Image (tube, rainbow, N blue to C red):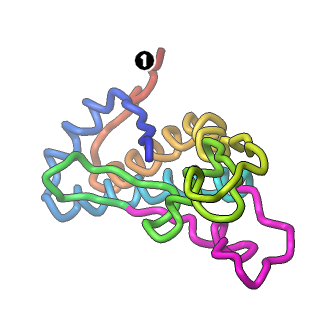
Amino acid sequence: MDDFSVKVDTSEVERALMAMPAKLAKRAARGGLQAAGEVMLAAMVALCPERTDEPTSDSNSLAPGVLKESLTTQVQVGTKNAPRVKVGPPRETAHVAWWIENGFDLISGGRRGKGGHLIRHIDGKHFMSGAFDESAEKAVDVLLEQLRTALDTEDTDLEGVGADEE
């Protein structure tokens, strides 16, 4: 599945976090990323299409509402990678999310080329990329505000952080 990412110049925040004890810095980063992820998750849940037809007995499709309910956030801080938040479906429903995001061919009677035939092409709904586009700016604002708040409790001055946005 394609990954989307946003890069923001947070060098001032990073310097302030580096000056803090490691546990407090990780806690501040985790809280900010979780809050930003929740903003993006809300947009994704709102845009996620929900199956409305009745499942058939021979179908292996997800039940109505399962994809939407499976969407989640996962914050990673303190790993070998930079701190980040992942927003989207877990591994169990990621393949279905990918099909719905990008579109797919509806096949009946087995695999295509192995007895199955094309019923029709289903266009992608682009709910994940749409949620990203809709919420990325607000998520960055929430992240920076959460970090400012956490750092202000440590008497660190972050006035002007994020003011030089493009």
Q: Residue at x 22, y 41 (%)?
A: 16
Determine the residue located farthest toward the front in the rendered image. 115
Say which amino acid is labelled 1.
Asp
Q: Quadrant of residue 4?
A: top left
| Between 30 and 67, the one nearer to me in the picture | 67
Residue bearing mark 1: 164
Is 23 on the left or on the right of 120, as rendered? left
Q: Look at the picture and state if 146 lies above or below 110.
A: above
Q: Which residues are magenta?
A: 48-74
Q: Residue at x 66, y 41 (%)?
A: 126
Q: Residue at x 75, y 56 (%)?
A: 49
Name the chief secondary structure element in magenta.
loop
Q: Residue at x 42, y 17 (%)?
A: 164
Residue 114 screen position, x and y as percent: 56, 57
| Between 27 and 153, the one nearer to me in the picture | 27
Residue 24 screen position, x and y as percent: 22, 62
* SS class, disc 1: loop
Is 51 on the left or on the right of 150, as rendered? right
- The reply to whether residue 39 is in sight is no
Q: Look at the picture and state if 5 lies above or below 115.
A: above
- The reply to whether residue 35 is in sight is yes
Q: Look at the picture and state if 75 lies above or below 57.
A: above
Residue 84 screen position, x and y as percent: 33, 50
Q: Quadrant of residue 136?
A: top right
